[in-house]
Structures are given as structure tokens and as C-alpha cells.
Image (cartoon, rainbow, N blue to C red):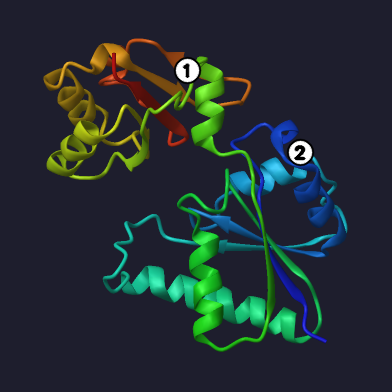
């Protein structure tokens, strides 16, 4: 009997924001396949999961996924593709033996999650696995709550934008929406804030760094964050006046 592959959102950082369903699946699964961004590095997803569910007795399989951009509709970077394939092969081995595998992922699996690429790779291999996706609290929603800024009200239009997009594309999207949430902002703050100033929106932006964690920081003036070392777990919310 084939095992089940669970792709589980563990939330933005605070283990208390993990859903009861996610915690229940982590508790019942003996194999945790956890993503890591660095070789021999820790896993934030594992840290969150272990903050809510005891990991003793679990088989923890840490796998590195390179932090490189993926452009849908275009061939993936060979190193990235190889990481997906290696992960899928390891997971397939356990599923074929009838063992369930849970893949904890930051935030919500539906939003820029590596776990979905692993699902697609499993399907490419023709694995007859069962899969269950468990949603989680996203950094998008958590940052809105932390900054006390609604994402959308009435007939407002919301867009979620990777801050790594080119300025022209960001400008185009900002012209179409009422509220924008920028993710992956930590490396492009000077360029992003400069564009917002150019469009007269810098004063309407809030930056939430390490959302929901003990050392969470909220920048009500995003211009003050330029030139600072901003953590990877940072999200910006922009509401047009």
C-alpha cells in the first residue's frame, strides 16, 4: 500500500499560528522531509514544526533546495531541477514502502512553496502517490495582521508581487491594484523603495521583518530600512491613499 505525501503549511514563524490539522499530521507522520536553503544549514520550517510537535522519534530528512529564481514556462536552473529530482526520488522510496511523508513548508504551500515543485516532479516520474495539501497562515496575512493594515476592503484589488521583479513590471502591477504585498524584499530594498518614492507611495508602505517571531520589527517608514541588513523573512504591504 502506497504511503501519502503531505505538503503542510506551518505558518510564518510562531508555532502557535500552525493549524491543528497541520500539527496532527506532523504528529502522526514518522518521516519529516524538511527543506533547507543552505548546505548543512538549519531549517526554519523544522524549527517551527518542532515548536508545536515533539520531533523525538521522528526520522528527519533535511534536503537543500538552492535559492535561485524559477521562471514558470522556462527550463529550471540545472541545480534547482536536480534538487527537486533528488527530493522526489527519496520521497518515492518511502511512499512505495507504505510510509507516509510530511513536507513542512513556511507559510502557506500555495504561495511560492518549493513543495509544489516536488509534487510536480513526483507526477513527472509517474509515482502513483496520494497527496494532501494543508494550508497554513501565510506571511501575507500575518504581515497584514502585525501591521494592522487590511489587505483589501470593499472593491479594492490586491496583488502579491515578488520584489525581485523588474521595475517596469512592478510599476505596471502597482498601477492596476489598490493594495500590493511585496515578498522577497530583503535584497532589493534600495531599488524597491526608490520606485515607491518615484510613484509617491513610499509613505503608504509598511515593512514587517521576522513576522510573528519574538524579534519581529515593523518599519512604518520603509525609507529608514534602506541600507540596513534586512532579514530574509520580510514582507512589505503598500496601500494606495
Tell which residue pokes out farthest to the front in this image.
155
Q: Nearer the viewer, residue 197 or 177?
A: 177
Q: Is residue 210 visible?
A: no
Q: Secondary structure at mark 2?
A: loop
Residue identifier under label 1: 149
Q: Residue 11 occupies which quadrant of the picture?
A: top right
Residue drawn at 76 percent across, 38 percent down: 51
Residue drawn at 75 percent across, 49 percent down: 22
Name the side, left or right, on which 208 lies relative to 34. Answer: left
Q: Is residue 28 above or below residue 162?
A: below
Label 2 neighbourhood size at 10 Å, few (<14), some (14-19), many (20+)? Answer: some
Specify which label sits upstream in the sequence, 2 or 1. Answer: 2
Q: Is disc 2 in contact with disc 1, using a CB cutoff of under 8 Å? A: no
Residue 30's spot in the image, x, y percent?
Answer: 83, 64
Q: Is residue 99 above or below residue 12?
A: below
Which marked residue is nearer to the observer: mark 2 or mark 1? 1
Location of the N terminus by quadrant is: bottom right
Residue identifier under label 2: 51
Residue drawn at 54 percent across, 32 percent down: 141
Q: Is residue 120 above or below residue 233?
A: below
Location of the C terminus by quadrant is: top left
Name the side, left or right, on which 208 lies relative to 77. Answer: right
Residue 3's spot in the image, x, y percent?
Answer: 77, 78
Residue drawn at 36 percent across, 33 percent down: 157
Amino acid at each position: 500500500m502506497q504511503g501519502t505525501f503531505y505538503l503542510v503549511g506551518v505558518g510564518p514563524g510562531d508555532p502557535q499560528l500552525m493549524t491543528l490539522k497541520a500539527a496532527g499530521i506532523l504528529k502522526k507522520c514518522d518521516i519529516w522531509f524538511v527543506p533547507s536553503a543552505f548546505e548543512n544549514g538549519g531549517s526554519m520550517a523544522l524549527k517551527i514544526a518542532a515548536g508545536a510537535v515533539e520531533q523525538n522519534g521522528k526520522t528527519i530528512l533535511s534536503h537543500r533546495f538552492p535559492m535561485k529564481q524559477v521562471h514558470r514556462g522556462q527550463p529550471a536552473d540545472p541545480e534547482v531541477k536536480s534538487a527537486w529530482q533528488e527530493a522526489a526520488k527519496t520521497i518515492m522510496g518511502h511512499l512505495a514502502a507504505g510510509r507516509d511523508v510530511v513536507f513542512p513548508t513556511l507559510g502557506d504551500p500555495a504561495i511560492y512553496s518549493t513543495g509544489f515543485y516536488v509534487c510536480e516532479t513526483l507526477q513527472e516520474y509517474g509515482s502513483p502517490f496520494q497527496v494532501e495539501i494543508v494550508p497554513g497562515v501565510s506571511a501575507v496575512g500575518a504581515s497584514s495582521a502585525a501591521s494592522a493594515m487590511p489587505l483589501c476592503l470593499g472593491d479594492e484589488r490586491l496583488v502579491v508581487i515578488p520584489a525581485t521583479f523588474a521595475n517596469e513590471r512592478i510599476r505596471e502591477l502597482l498601477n492596476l491594484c489598490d493594495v500590493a504585498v511585496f515578498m522577497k524584499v530583503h535584497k532589493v530594498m534600495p531599488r524597491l523603495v526608490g520606485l515607491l518614492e518615484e510613484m509617491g507611495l513610499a509613505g503608504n508602505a509598511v515593512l514587517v521583518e521576522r513576522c510573528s517571531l519574538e524579534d519581529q520589527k515593523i518599519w512604518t517608514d520603509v525609507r529608514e530600512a534602506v541600507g540596513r541588513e534586512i532579514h530574509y523573512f520580510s514582507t512589505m504591504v503598500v496601500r494606495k491613499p
